[in-house]
Image (cartoon, grey):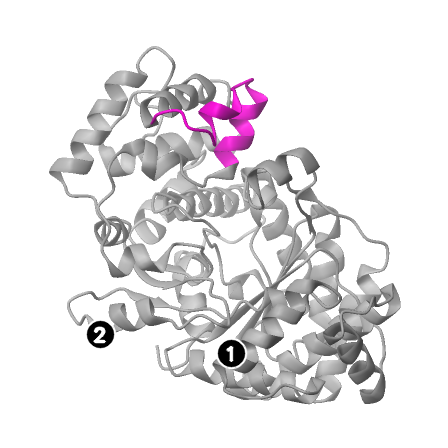
Amino acid sequence: MAFINDDFMLQNDTAKFLYHTYAKSLPIFDYHCHLDVKLIAKDYQFSSIAELWLAGDHYKWRAMRANGISEEMITGNASSVEKFEAWSKTIENCIGNPLYHWTHLELKNYFGIDELLNENNWKEIYNKANKVIKEEQLTARKLLQLSNVTYICTTDNPLDSLEYHDKISADKNFKIKVLPSFRPDEAFTIGEKKFVDFVKKLAQITNTTIKSYSDFVKCLEERVDYFDKRGAFISDHSFEKLFFKESTDEEVEAIFQKSLNENQITDEEYKKFISRLIIDLGAIYHKKNWVMQIHFGAIRNNNTVMYERLGPDTGFDSIADQSDLAYALNRLLDTMYQRNTLPKMIIYNLNPEYNHIVASAIANFQSNEEGIKNKIQFGAGWWFNDTEQGMLRQMSTLADHGLLMHFTGMVTDSRSFLSFPRHEYFRRILCNYIGEQVEEGKFPNDKKLLKKLVENICYYNALNFFAKDI
């Protein structure tokens, strides 16, 4: 029997029934990814499995480094064939890592390959996969269609023209919705040169003179409007830590001016500015009926030598910690709630030690008169947590503190066009978790109830949560 078989990860009869009857055929709403929209717009034809698999995939790069592979074979100038061979020598050593499962799911789903990739058969598999890519014309759009995707939300800089989104939208023959997300990371780099550069570019693109913090926020809102007109309904924010510091308008203005003049700001000033900008942007999203995503807990670019050599997002990030998270998160949400500007929100923590802190905090702010279910969502296991154990920890914590029935489910958070089997992986783990609860007598064996639970989490909750003329 093939390793990736029909009942892969399904360890009980109830799980098998739930997955094959309800979960398997549902489409995918991938509301957070990092796919290159230009490749979708141009319907890019991939040249090889090496290009599809290894370009930009820092998950694989980390594993290859741990396997003693030379950097030349990872991010260097080695040929595609050499890099594929190096990955093949690595994958059989990835037992226990989700990369082993993802790799073989991808080989099975897109290329019909059941063999386990290793250093002995890599050339055969390389040739088989490349033959499929050529004969089946596996372009960016074809891969999305094969993945049964209906909606994709990319991650986009506020200064982006969104021209490629416009081109995709204008093509009425392409039915998959590819929508932008507002990702204003540079707006939070107060005290750095990149912040000053961002303000200048923002002023240019909005044809405005930015003299004050108020001007700055108005220009950001103008860009939100620009995204909104192109179908956007979601923002995304990435922080190492979450802060909350009270501030007056005068204090925030003074901090803004100091940064524009490239004067050093204090740690206290930094926290005040970040807190205020999160709250003010939240108010804008609330007005637009957008969803605000917050990812926090990554400490980035930790290997200085490799960062200077390769730059960011190359596999040298890890999990951060902080001491005052419960206070900061509750106060941020409470301030927006008091002002009646709390938007729909999804919060993802990278440090699993904080699962219960996050899940219990968001439960304080679910009250709303709009009838929104789980208005503040505890996001799916993210990055170092999109593993079997990470997903199970997230789901069980959500069930402990809130309503698992209204969970908006999985995202790929990926740059790879082959990453959509992560949704299948999640669905199999979800169905197995529910099946275990049923067979242990903890959940009722009520097919109507279980159908609702599985289908909601896998697809319909996301569709309803983000509903904004989609």
Front one among 320 and 311: 311
> At numbered mark 1, what does the secondary structure look like: helix, strand or loop?
loop
Relative to 400, 116 lies left or right: left
Above or below, 388 relative to 215: above
Task: Identify the residue under disc 2.
Answer: 170
Compared to residue 211, the image places residue 65 above or below, namely: above
Q: Amino acid at mark 2?
A: Ala
Task: Give the amino acid at mark 1.
Answer: Trp
Q: Quadrant of residue 39?
A: bottom left
Farthest residue in the front direction? 261
Identify whether 283 is placed above or below 240. Answer: below
Residue at point 42% right, 24% down?
87
Q: Residues within 10 Å of mark 1 (few under 14, many from 20)?
A: many
Pointer 1 residue: 290
Q: Give the secondary structure at mark 2.
A: helix
- Residue 301 lies, in percent from the top left, at 66, 43
Q: Which residues are magenta?
A: 59-79
Q: Earlier in the sequence, mark 2 or mark 1?
A: 2
Q: Nearer the viewer, residue 184 or 92?
A: 184
- Name the spot of residue 429 as percent of width and height, x first: 48, 42
* Quadrant of residue 307 within the rendered picture: top right
Q: Left or right: 227 with respect to 133? A: right
The answer for how far apart the CA atoms under marks 2 and 1 are is 23 Å
62 falls in the magenta region:
yes
Q: Residue at x 60, y 64 (%)?
A: 185
